[in-house]
Image (cartoon, helix red, strand yellow):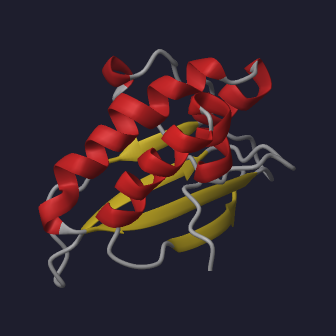
């Protein structure tokens, strides 16, 4: 399965991004929660990729594509999972219908092909297996 980083993201560490989070989904809208397992010895590499390369690179995208980042929160793990990996969560809230959340194509738009491939390898080398994806609907409450 093609690895996707459903942008995810942020949340929360607005100090690492130039994007403030917008309001959350309304009743009936789709929300994605993506869990990325990260190798214990690659946490720093993964966080560098997310916060120093990928998120800042969003400023090079169109206004429409920047919305993907504005409507995504990143949650950092507080401890290791039983298998020793660390679970980073991305909450797309709400999901933008028809948008492409794949990391590699976005990296190409941000940095061009050679750098995109180099940066994507930082991401894939840090992950410890397939993503777990949840597709949910916002409740009325």
Name the residue at the front extreme.
114
Q: Is 65 positioned to the left or the right of 76 in the image?
A: right
Q: Position of residue 56 (x, y in %)?
A: 46, 24
Q: Position of residue 44 (x, y in %)?
A: 18, 47
Q: Is 97 positioned to the left or the right of 23 in the image?
A: right
Q: Quadrant of residue 81?
A: bottom left
Q: Position of residue 115 (x, y in %)?
A: 50, 39
Q: Position of residue 128 (x, y in %)?
A: 32, 75
Q: Is 78 positioned to the left or the right of 12 in the image?
A: left
Vertical order, 138 against 62 (above or below): below
Q: Is 68 positioned to the left or the right of 30 in the image?
A: left
The one nearer the camera, 91 or 100, is 100
Name the residue at the right extreme.
98
Vertical order, 19 against 96 (above or below): above
Q: Quadrant of residue 83?
A: bottom left
Q: Is residue 69 visible?
A: yes
Q: Is residue 11 visible?
A: no
The one nearer the camera, 85 or 28, is 85
Residue at image coords 12%, 63%: 41
Residue at image coords 35%, 53%: 122
Vertical order, 34 against 11 (above or below): below
**Quadrant assignment for the N terminus:** bottom right
Q: Quadrant of residue 106?
A: top right
């Amino acid at each position: 399965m093609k690895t996707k980083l459903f942008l995810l993201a942020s949340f929360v560490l607005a100090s690492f991004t130039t994007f403030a989070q917008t309001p959350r989904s309304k009743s009936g809208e789709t929300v994605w929660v993506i869990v990325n397992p990260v190798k214990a010895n690659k946490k720093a590499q993964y966080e560098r990729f997310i916060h120093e390369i990928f998120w800042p690179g969003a400023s090079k995208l169109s206004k429409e594509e920047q919305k993907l980042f504005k409507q995504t929160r990143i949650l950092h793990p507080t401890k290791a999972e039983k298998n020793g990996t660390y679970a980073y969560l991305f909450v797309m809230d709400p999901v933008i219908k028809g948008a492409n959340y794949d990391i590699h194509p976005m990296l190409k738009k941000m940095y061009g092909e050679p750098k995109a491939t180099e940066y994507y390898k930082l991401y894939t080398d840090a992950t410890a297996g397939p993503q777990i994806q949840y597709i949910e609907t916002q409740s009325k409450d």
